[in-house]
Amino acid sequence: MHPPLLSPSLLAGDHAHLAASARIPANLGLRWLHVDIMDAHFVPNLTFGPGTVAALRAAGATQFFDTHLMLDEPHRYVEAFATAGASSISIHIEPAYDHQATLARIRALGCQCGIVLNPDTPATAVEHLLPHVDLVLVMTVQPGFGGQSFRRDTLAKMRTLADWRAARGFRWRLEVDGGIDLTTAPECRAHGADTFVAGTAFFAAPDKAAFADAIARL
Ligand code: DX5
Ligand code: ZN
């Protein structure tokens, strides 16, 4: 299992000042930033596009952009996000497209690649892709909005994936996203997660350094 890593979600930042919001975790020494891309088809909401990602880079953001594509047709956009400055690109298993070819394309573009499961999607749905990814993202809420409550029924799936990782010698990160705070992150850690997306809990924390320290000590 990797050391714990916090990936603050820019979705919970100030959308009129995204570059300033990106600097908040960077100034605390946090290396990752989670960037949520929504298309109003796969999820009922809209966020940013590749132009925003490029603008964040142009404004000086140097952290690892952990890019979460919540799109019906992610294969059509991976090149645009890689060119814009994504560091990793994670794609959902649920829509129908060639997942394996898209993961390979992401790597060929020089990015790390991840596969994402919605809360009701079983671990077996991604089993065939596990040798081909750098990250597995277990959604702990139904994607689309920040500020939702953590779903404890996803913990068993984390354990399954973590057990497969250990038994089969995989090296990918096991990331969790949705309702992650200082109560739910330890539960996920106990079930094998190592990478913690936090939007609301991070940006609303009065002492963000203390929040980051607590995650680092998990
Ligand atoms: C939800 C997004 C999450 C979101 C999490 O669809 O994928 O990354 O930012 O927000 P919180 O931490 O507020 O649940
Ligand atoms: Zn996300």
Image (spheres, grey):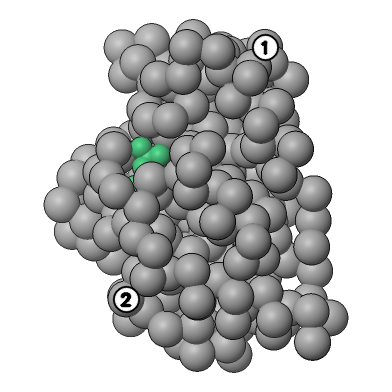
User: What's the CA distance linking mark 2 and mark 1?
Assistant: 36 Å
Q: Is residue 196 left or right of residue 132?
A: left
Look at mark 2 in the image and give the residue it sits on.
120
Question: Residue 79: percent from the left, percent from the top?
Answer: 52, 53
* Residue 114 visible in the snapshot: no
Question: Residue 90: percent from the left, percent from the top?
Answer: 52, 58
Q: Is residue 172 left or right of residue 60?
A: right
> In this orientation, which residue lies closer to the viewer: 205 or 203?
205
Residue at image x 38%, y 10%?
17
Which disc, if any, is residue 27?
1
Q: Quadrant of residue 93?
A: bottom left
- Residue lying at the far right in this picture: please name it: 169
Instruction: Indicate which disc, 2 or 1, sits on the residue closer to the N terminus.
Output: 1
The amino acid beneath tag 1 is Asn
* Residue 144 visible in the snapshot: yes
> In this orientation, which residue lies closer to the viewer: 146 or 15?
146
Q: Is residue 31 left or right of residue 185?
A: right
* Kind of element beneath mark 1: helix
Quadrant of image for the C terminus: top right
Q: Residues within 10 Å of mark 1 (few under 14, many from 20)?
A: few
* Kind of element beneath mark 2: loop
Q: Residues within 10 Å of mark 2 (few under 14, many from 20)?
A: few
> In this orientation, which residue lies closer to the viewer: 120 or 44?
120
Residue at image x 42%, y 69%?
154
Question: Residue 91: percent from the left, percent from the top?
Answer: 47, 63
The amino acid beneath tag 2 is Asp
Q: Is mark 2 within 8 Å of ligand 1?
A: no
Q: Quadrant of residue 216?
A: top right
